[in-house]
Amino acid sequence: MNRRGPSMNVRVGRCRYRSPVICASGTFGYGTELGALADYSAIGAVTTKTVTLDPREGNRPPRIFETAHGVLNSIGLENPGIERFCREIVPALRRMKIPFIVSIGGTTQSEYEELARILDRVAGVKAVELNLSCPNLRLKKMVSQEKVLTKKLVAGVRRRTTKTVIAKLTPEVTDITEIARAAEAGGADALSLVNTYYGMALNVETGVPRLGSVYGGYSGRAIKPLSLYRVWRVYQAVSIPVIGGGGIETADDAIEFFLAGASAVSLGTVNMVYPKCAAGIKKGLQAYLRRRGIPRIARLTGEGHERAKRVG
Ligand SMILES: Cc1cc2nc3c(=O)[nH]c(=O)nc-3n(C[C@H](O)[C@H](O)[C@H](O)COP(=O)(O)O)c2cc1C
């Protein structure tokens, strides 16, 4: 450990970040709007809201509903489209000097490939995250619910970009390790786990669903054990780094994800309540490493598997 304390640098694909705390897509705007509400110094990278080829208005409201232990959302990928994104948002992100990961989505493989091709030429973009929870037009299910499609799509994107490619998977599958292996075989540099779980809520007085699109994605505190389990399993199945998240609110939550196999952690819903949370979580991680004499955060990745072997 050097005089300044444990190293918090992490490597995700071809990118190096000075903090392992990453803001998850869709919960931190484009990274440019929050200003003094956020503390950017603790953030390794911001993942932008998913951008599509054409602008999208998103789903009909209401699109967010808070439950006792989490949040339901059905935003429906509202975004200005790739052209405006590159013209207005990328320059703003570059001025802020924070590393960013561009989340992309589409309804066909060729849309993802075209987005990757466009972004490959955009200065400042170093990584793309494929939001593979978008419904595929032909299959009528999410890309990352199908291993053949996952591998093919990731390989198609891989051919069109030299940037770091991160595949973000849905947890809504029988065996997420199969999908993770398919993404790795397609050429992904890293995986991001997990996106939201299907969920819904009803108003008992009116009988009407709380979300305008009836059901949506569930995130926040309640999903943590489910997400942690998936990170644990995927870590054993692949050799590329995993960005782990889903329900993280505290430094201890983040530590669990590192122990399970994450190389970096993502903060989603918690940002909507407390956009400065990254600072406290990074500080808590540093304190933990210092207390245990661990010189760098990267050493914590997968440590839980070693400990489990020793006790079991
Ligand atoms: C309001 C909202 C919007 C989201 N939008 C996106 C999105 O555009 N693209 C994406 O890949 N994930 C999106 N997500 C999923 C989050 O990035 C994250 O994967 C998920 O919420 C689980 O993490 P959490 O429990 O920490 O929020 C969104 C989540 C929320 C709550």
Image (cartoon, grey):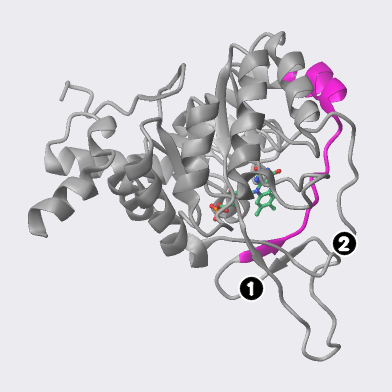
Q: Decide: is 284 above or below 67.
A: above
Q: Is residue 76 magenta?
A: yes
Q: Distance between the residues labelled 1 and 2?
A: 17 Å
Tell me the quadrant of the picture where the N terminus can be found.
top left
Closer to us: 278 or 256: 256
Amino acid type shown at disc 1: Thr
Tell me the quadrant of the picture where the C terminus can be found.
bottom left
| Residue 280 in picture, x, y percent from top left | 40, 45
Q: Decide: is 69 above or below 253.
A: below
Picture residue at 66% right of the left edge, 22% below the top: 157
| Residue 149 in picture, x, y percent from top left | 66, 38
Please say if the residues under marks 1 and 2 sit with CB atoms less than 8 Å apart: no
Q: How many labels does the image show?
A: 2
Q: Give the range drawn in magenta.
A: 71-91
- Reading the image, the residue beneath label 2 is 61
| Residue 233 in picture, x, y percent from top left | 37, 51
Closer to us: 289 or 13: 13
Q: Is residue 118 left or right of residue 124?
A: right
Q: In which quarter of the image is residue 243?
A: top left
Closer to the chain start, of discs 1 and 2, is 2
Q: In this view, does 167 lie to the left or right of 1?
A: right
| Residue 8 in picture, x, y percent from top left | 32, 29
Q: Residues within 10 Å of mark 1 (few under 14, many from 20)?
A: some
Q: In this view, does 225 lie to the left or right of 133?
A: left
- Reading the image, the residue beneath label 1 is 67
Picture residue at 22% right of the left edge, 48% below the top: 305
